[in-house]
Amino acid sequence: MRALMDDILSAFGLLTRLPLPLPGRGSHEASNLSRSVWAYPLVGAGVGALSALVWFAAQLAGLGLGLSAGLALTSQILITGALHEDGLADFADGLGGGSDVPEKLAIMRDSRIGTYGVIALVMVLGLRWGGIAGLALHTVLAGLVCSAALGRLGIVALLALLGPARDDGLGALVANPPRRSVMAAFVLGVGLVMAHLPVITASLALLAFAAVVGIVAVLAKRQIGGYTGDVLGAGEQLAQTGVLLVLAAAT
């Protein structure tokens, strides 16, 4: 039980800015961070649930669907410290601006944001905002929980499908997760979706998730030879967005 709690706290500590007590020093070793990937869908579900509370609070305050969706989206960004959004922007800049693998990796590591990164952020944030606003009242909680959970499962899927493109950075900290942790993440993520959504809607959401993650994996493999922390962040954002759009269309 102590190991499970350490994994959960490590996952929340890595992927969010929530003021939770961190596990002991030894739990932040690379091997333990890799082991904790099974809890990533749980982190996503927590972020989604908190943003749903913000959405409902905005509705009670008399705000419209657009403003409620904007506040829910803002809360997700604040909870995670824009970790995944930063990865998306860097990934877009690297793929769009680099001519070879070393240059693409150098651009992705640069803290400055370029045209491709800005465009990617504007497009994805706009789609996420519209997707949340398009959810029916009775599906808001399920939609936010499931899309955020599958977004974090996208990180695990990319870790399983690809190898690291370099041996340092955030991506290297969670490299080579144990197979049992990967399997547990998929069981947890798929289980959350099946528990919250009708079978047909859940199936469509999972298909969208698989398609988006597959595209990101192919792009990352061809462009830079594997994943970095930015690739993982981009995969999370795009998977979450794809699932949100499917859920908005299905409601």
Image: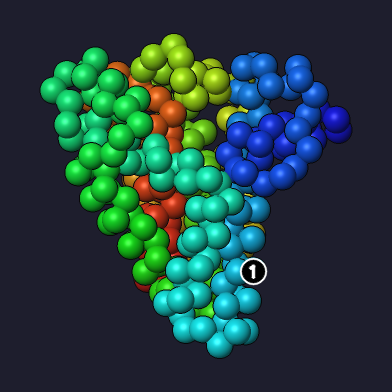
What residue lies at 65% left-to-right and 53% top-to-bottom?
A: 46
Residue furthest out toward the right: 1
Q: Which residue is at the front of the view, 178 or 106? A: 106
Question: Which image quarter: residue 112?
Answer: top left
146 lies above or below 142: above
Identify the residue under disc 1: 53
Amino acid on which disc 1 is placed: Leu
Question: Which image quarter: residue 218?
Answer: top left
What residue lies at 43% left-to-right and 38% top-to-bottom?
A: 233
8 lies above or below 137: above
What is the x, y in percent for residue 63? Answer: 51, 84
Q: Which residue is at the front of the view, 18 or 196? A: 18
What is the x, y in percent for residue 158? Answer: 43, 31
What residue lies at 60% left-to-right and 43% top-to-bottom?
A: 16
Is residue 146 left or right of 104 when viewed as pictured?
A: right
- Tell me if I can see residue 250 in this picture: no
- Tell me if I can see residue 131 in this picture: yes
Residue furthest out toward the bottom: 62
| Picture quarter with the N terminus | top right
Is residue 85 left or right of 176 when viewed as pictured?
A: left
Is residue 87 left or right of 29 when viewed as pictured?
A: left
What residue lies at 47% left-to-right and 46% top-to-bottom?
A: 82
Q: Which residue is at the front of the view, 187 or 58? A: 58
What is the x, y in percent for residue 190? Answer: 57, 48
| Picture quarter with the C terminus | bottom left
Q: Secondary structure at mark 1?
A: helix
What is the x, y in percent for residue 107? Answer: 26, 26
Q: Mark 1, residues whose alpha carbon is within 10 Å: few (<14), some, or many (≥20)?
A: some
Residue furthest out toward the top: 167
Instruction: Identify the image's colour scheme: rainbow, by chain, secondary structure or one colour.
Output: rainbow
